[in-house]
Amino acid sequence: MSNTINIIGDKNSMVETPYELIEQTIDKVKNILENHFPDFISFENGSFTINRGSTQVMVVVRPFTEDDTCVECFANVVTGASISNELLRFLLRKNAELHFGSFGLLFDDTITFSNSLSGINIDANELKTTLNAIAVIADYYDDIIVEMAGGKRAADLVEDFEQN
């Protein structure tokens, strides 16, 4: 097993993050979650999730540079919405209005809300604030988006899964 994880930058360069940095960040994140979000779920690969309101917030530790990692925090806000120009303009305007984080669109048109943090010096306050902000924003806007464009919130998908 290599001691670094490669990230492709531009076509002529490759950035390698030492595995030890990734492990250190995973340990920090896990410790913060244990202390502030005791009901979190760990997937044992640097990925975690917390539940808040009608949403789930994922936390993923990723390689970034030779001397830093990235902690991605995101929520799948709505799945299966009808993606229209009106909806896209709404989401882009919200991106301009919100203090941090942004709405995005996955390959399958799932609407997300996310924010990334530098991992090597991450502290409890910034991770807690980020997770709570993502949860509040996703929980608030999922109802608005479903009303505008249909689809299902994360809680609806969990409910559907549990019924089947």
Image: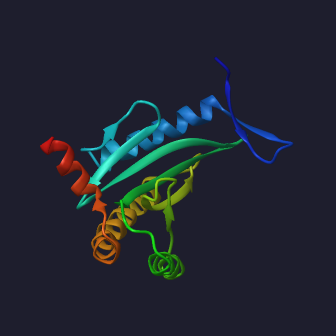
Q: Is residue 16 above or below residue 91?
A: above
Tell me the quadrant of the picture where the N terminus can be found: top right
Judged from this view, the residue extending furthest toward the right is 12
Q: Residue at x 61, y 35 (%)?
A: 21
Q: Is residue 75 above or below residue 59?
A: below
Residue 7: image quadrant is top right
Is residue 40 left or right of 89 when viewed as pictured?
A: left
Q: Residue at x 44, y 56 (%)?
A: 74
Tell me the quadrant of the picture where the C terminus can be found: top left
Q: Residue 14 placed where, x, y %?
A: 79, 39
Is residue 151 left or right of 26 when viewed as pictured?
A: left
Along the viewing direction, whichever of 106 and 60 lies nearer the viewer:
106
Is residue 121 left or right of 53 when viewed as pictured?
A: right
Q: Residue 25 placed where, x, y %?
A: 53, 40
Along the viewing direction, whichever of 106 and 137 lies nearer the viewer:
106
Residue 134: image quadrant is bottom left
Q: Is residue 58 above or below residue 17?
A: below
Along the viewing direction, whichever of 82 and 121 lies nearer the viewer:
82
Q: Residue at x 48, y 60 (%)?
A: 114
Q: Residue 94 placed where, x, y %?
A: 47, 79
Is residue 95 left or right of 138 when viewed as pictured?
A: right
